[in-house]
Image (cartoon, rainbow, N blue to C red):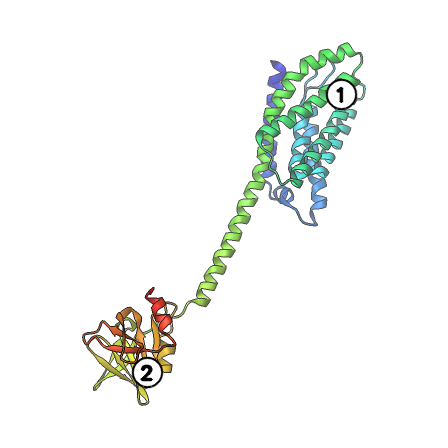
Amino acid sequence: MELCYNLVINIGLLALIALALTNIPVVEKILCQEDGHAKIGRFVLGGIFGGFCIFSTCTGGVVQGAIPNTRVLGVLAGGLLCGPTVGITAGVIGAVHRFFFDPQGVTTFACAFSTFLEGIIAGAVYQILKKKNLTLRWPELLLITAIAEGVHMMNLLIFVKPFALAVEIVKTLTFPMVIVNSVGMLLFYSIFKDVYMRQMLEEDNERLEILNNDLLEQSKANAKPKIGPFGLQAGDHAELVEADNIFYIEAIHKGAKVYCNDKVFYSNEPLIEWEKKLDSSDNNFIRIHRSYIANLTKGESIQPDSKNGYALCMKDSNHSIIPISRKVIHEVKEYYSM
């Protein structure tokens, strides 16, 4: 029970250190580097995760000549999160330190060798997941940690002499180290994984902001200015007429007549100039005949005319009839979904 308690305390301390480190901008940047400058950063990370291994060894207790610890967390987390370079570097650092920490210990070689193997295991799993484009889930993380500790126990049985002592050590350590370290790995791994999630969210937000800005600029580029109002002559005075109040425009000599519901205005500008003025994204105004521009929102019906063609009947007070050119009849019918 005391052994489990010590391991839990060890994991808690590691988690606090990990939380502090991941809030340091330099460490966060190195964790998320994937470009050509990341090679040195990988070794730096290997040193950081190797430091977790050293801390775990130094804070571990002593049971029958063995040192129960959470060293596996640093090695596996480094390799699974950051790849073989980090995992193996952390494994080598942890293994070398474990060897020189207690050179004459009965479990020294077995534990050091296991630490190195854990780095290789983590790097190999990382490569497999990356190749198959898979994400590591928590049941798999528990299983990998349990397997790594299982390898640790196997090495103890192989290298610790006498064998009877090895069996006693394995009986004492297997349950607490496999169970506690496997659960502890979920916490430790998630702390560093959270850095990647934050980075992904920031990158997604940046991409969305760029996309929104591009769409806004595109919208601005494609948007056409509001049309009207127009200053038009009515007898001895001029009036401002909104585009929506215009029913149709008729060409006359050197100018045009602008028809509203119950008023007629005169313009010195020809239809071609009015086409430019009335051009908008909604395309309500169409030159339906060489002599007429019609506001299709003011159309009442389409009917045959006397020349085997079609004419547009307007909604004005006179129910004006405007001829439709054969060239644009399909466009007009499409506007009215006919």
Chain-order first, disc 1 or disc 2: 1
On the picture, is 115 further left or further right than 189?
Answer: right
- Which residue is at the far bottom? 253
Q: Position of residue 139 (x, y in %)?
A: 58, 28
User: Residue sitting at 55 percent across and 41 percent down?
Assistant: 197
Name the residue tied to disc 1.
155
User: Residue sitting at 18 percent across and 74 percent down?
Assistant: 317
Query: In this picture, is 298 found above or below 167?
Result: below
- Which residue is at the far front? 308
Q: Which quadrant of the rendered structure holds the C terminus?
A: bottom left
Question: On the image, which quarter does residue 257 sit in?
Answer: bottom left
Name the residue tied to disc 2.
291
Q: Is residue 274 visible?
A: yes
Nearest the viewer among 298 and 223 is 298
Q: Mark 1 or mark 2, which is nearer to you? A: 2
Q: Position of residue 63 (x, y in %)?
A: 70, 14
Q: Amino acid at mark 2?
A: Ser
Q: Which quadrant of the rendered structure holds the N terminus?
A: top right
Q: Residues within 10 Å of mark 2 (few under 14, many from 20)?
A: some
Q: Is residue 299 visible?
A: no
Question: On the image, which quarter does residue 322 sit in?
Answer: bottom left
Nearest the viewer among 23 and 198 is 198
- Distance (Cα) linking label 1 and label 2: 97 Å
The label shown at residue 255 is none
Tag 1 near tag 2, CB within 8 Å: no
Q: Amino acid at mark 1?
A: Asn
| Helix, strand or loop status at disc 1 | helix
- Which residue is at the far top? 164
Question: On the image, which quarter does residue 184 sit in?
Answer: top right
Q: Position of residue 43 (x, y in %)?
A: 72, 40
Q: Residues within 10 Å of mark 1 (few under 14, many from 20)?
A: many
